[in-house]
Image (spheres, rainbow, N blue to C red):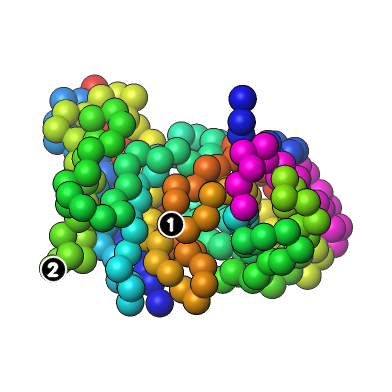
Amino acid sequence: AQSVTQLGSHVSVSEGALVLLRCNYSSSVPPYLFWYVQYPNQGLQLLLKYTTGATLVKGINGFEAEFKKSETSFHLTKPSAHMSDAAEYFCAVSGRIGGSYIPTFGRGTSLIVHP
Amino acid sequence: DGGITQSPKYLFRKEGQNVTLSCEQNLNHDAMYWYRQDPGQGLRLIYYSQIVNDFQKGDIAEGYSVSREKKESFPLTVTSAQKNPTAFYLCATTTGGANVLTFGAGSRLTVL
């Protein structure tokens, strides 16, 4: 079984401030981890992913995330928020279940950026 | 350009009517997925298909049906048995394994 918990349905920051979106996962197999972003009334786009290797992963638009196995976490950060970062963010885990990889998503965190 | 086309983007239907949402891809991806999105609940898996003529139920398959007669197409039918069908529906594909999902733009279904 696998699951994802995103702490905080809404996160509010000022423009230029640090962004931290939290994600914890559980998986009975080595996981692949992803962060996706969704703008209103659109599909999701990949921000970054962790499969194997380096635990600090850099993505698009200045975002990065660190895989911490001991904490079962994959938090998303960005040093300085921009107004255009306002969107819904989803953490996802994909582990091999039977013969297939089935992605499981968290409930999402809405990032609000104040001027 | 390769991508996923979902249609219609907006759909209004009366209670008790079946509706079919279209998902077409030209990415030559093997695996296709349907997710339902409701505010505050994230994405929940309805059905997925790894190969043509084969598909499996996801976490919330009741009241839905799918087919996979062609690699490019994975339509979703929302039947009258689905008690609360108003939602945003997302189709996604991947090349397989643990690869990244590519999403369509979604279809918003409103049942009046």
Residue at the extreme right of the image, as rendered: B17
Residue to which mark 1 is pinned: B98
Is B12 part of what is drawn in magenta?
A: yes
Which amino acid, by three-letter code, is at mark 1? Answer: Ala
Write the residue at 17% across / 49% down: A54
Image position of B56 (left or right of A32):
right
Q: Give the quarter of the image for residue A17.
A: top left
> Is any atom of residue A95 visible in this view?
yes
Q: Is B44 displayed left or right of B34 in the figure?
A: left
- Name above or below for residue B11 compared with residue B98: above
Quarter assignment of residue B98: bottom left
Q: Residue A108, how many percent across, how many down? A: 38, 52
Q: How far apart are marks 1 and 2 (CA)?
A: 22 Å
- Left or right of B38? Residue A35 is left
Amino acid type of the residue that numbered disc 2 sits on in the rendered structure: Ser
- Residue name at image x 38 percent, y 72 percent: A2
Instruction: Indicate the position of residue A33 as horizontal and vertical percent values.
Output: 32, 55
- Residue neighbourhood size for the residue with mark 2, other residues' Cα within 10 Å, grouped as few (<14), some (14–19), many (≥20): few
**Pair 1/2: label in front:** 1
Q: Residue at x 52, y 72 (%)?
A: A99
User: Bounds of the magenta span?
Assistant: B11-30
Q: In this view, does A22 lie above or below A94?
A: above
Residue B15: x and y, percent?
Answer: 82, 58
Residue located beneath label 2 in the image: A70
Considering depth in this image, is A18 or B56 the residue closer to the camera?
B56
Chain for disc number 1: B
